[in-house]
Amino acid sequence: MAVFKIGKVILRSLFKKPATLMYPIKPREWQERTRGHIEINEADCILCGICAKRCPTLAINVDKAARTWTIERMLCIQCGACAENCPKKCLLMKPDYTSPDVVKVTDTFNIPDAEKKTEKTSAGSGAAPVCDRETCIYCGICAKQCPCNAITVDRKEKTWEVDENVCISCGICVEKCPKNSLKID
Amino acid sequence: MGKRTIIPFGPQHPVLPEPVHLDLVIEDERVVEAIPSIGYIHRGLEKLVEKKEYTEMVYVIERICGICSFGHGWGYCAAVEGAMDIKVPERAEYLRTIWHELGRMHSHLLWLGLLADGFGFESLFMHCWRIRETVLDIFEETTGGRVIFSVCKVGGLRKDVDAKTLEKMSGLLNGIKKELQELTDVFLEDRSVKNRLCGVGVLSKEEAEELGAVGPMARASGVAQDMRMAGHGKYLELGFEPVVETDGDCYARCKVRLREVFQSIDLINKAIDEIPEGDIAVPVKGNVDGEFITRMEQPRGEAIYYAKGQGTKFLERMRVRTPTNANIPAMVKTLQGCDLADVPMLVLTIDPCISCTER
């Protein structure tokens, strides 16, 4: 049995730089992948609301009428599901944490209207959904769920149309179709 | 024979990071009986499967425990993948194995620190946690989080790790190996440490089997039971063999965990050498219909994951049986007849995670 086995480690530590940082005088270095907080590029947002639907903690609220995108910072768990599912890639996971606070912070961003229209026309490059007319029952759920109102369905006339210039290929219609008649390639 | 007294121990106690309460029936300084009670930290996470889509539920399951969070995420995904009959790509399996072993390293290093803190060896405690910090840095660089990783998803992984980072990881781990060797000498040879650990809380092999002990607690008593032998991940391909000690005391439990950290480093290095190129996820379509049980070896022992779905996007039932749950009877057994001063040590050596147990 030995006594004071840790002596060597302690002696070496005495002459080494401390293992801790003098925080906050020396700021912490973030890694490229650190999941710190979510940021939004307002100009690209089309208020489709997929981020709010995908958020497991319901931290994001998208108000289409008021054209706002809101995030409750204390509810957000930095899982990155919103950024991963955003069709326009306008949500970004930034490495630095939000600063500590004594109140719950809610950040609201106004989404500009003018840019949105130009974005829409340029967004038409992606694939638009294709409808299988044999199985389609013209229920209109796809049209109701479409975040850009790109789909028009007429039950009486039995027509189904998609405006390819407006469609953003978000895939919500495909997901919501009760008959699985829609497809995006 | 002295008069019997009941001493309440916990749920708040300086050496216990977890809220477990024990009623200790003592005679003089000797514990005659220990009656455990839990129920201070139930969060109802299993109930949430009825409200969260099965793909979103991974983020919740990960938060069952801050220490074995990767293992919980993997266990849940493995259960759902089993129910949906999904085959995960090879590269994803290798990366999952690497992250799971890193998780084991950081759990065991944390435990070793807490053990040192438990017997009052503060500088040893700090050095263990200093080494653990390197593991957490690796996690942050590869997954983006220090303890909650959010990289596992049903069907594979969300993030890949490039060859350069894997090489760097291997270098860092070899550095940890060298530093940990010095601390291993302290844990296993220092007289003051041995005085506190040797011969304390002996659990025989028969008792361990009878009481259903799992993980390092069972392996320190000579039961060669490790779920990594059951075939999940890439352990069999990496030539995994369980670490077994036979003494069954606190010293043996400490030794098993120390040896497991070294074993994890070797497993990760081997996995980095063998990892194939390829996809990290397969697309998942449809909903869970059917049920599946999977068993995983968490740092603390065997955990069981059960998932049941009925064709909707919400699971009907999700159940997790955690290792601490299985180890409590063995802990109560070792507490009988021990000194009052050894109680914290004995509670610590099962590596209790009450947050996991209650969910």
Image: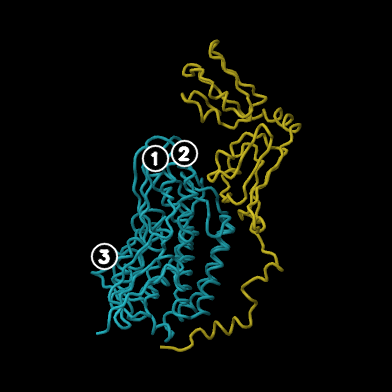
Rendered colour, chain A: yellow
Q: In the image shown, does B78 or B250 lie closer to the viewer?
A: B250
| Residue B159, image x, y percentages | 55, 50
- Where residue B211 is drawn, which disc sits there? 3
- Most extreme residue toward the right, as rendered? A114
Check disc 1 and report its element: helix, strand or loop: helix
- Where residue B21 is drawn, which disc sits there? none
Instruction: Reply above or below: B128 against A37.
Output: below
**Numbered disc 3: what chain?**
B
Q: Label 1 vs label 2: CA separation?
A: 9 Å
- Most extreme residue toward the top, as rendered? A157
**Three-letter amino acid code at the position of disc 2:** Val
Instruction: Reply above or below: A115 against B359.
Output: above
Q: How many neighbours does mark 3 have within 10 angstroms: few (below 14), some (14-19), or many (20 or more)?
A: some
Asked if marks 1 and 2 touch (Cβ < 8 Å), the reply is yes
Question: Among the chains, which one is cyan?
Answer: B
- Residue position for label 2: B284
**Three-letter amino acid code at the position of disc 3:** Leu
- Residue position for label 1: B84
Instruction: Reply above or below: B177 against B76.
Output: below
Check disc 3 and report its element: helix, strand or loop: loop
Q: Label 2 vs label 3: CA separation?
A: 40 Å
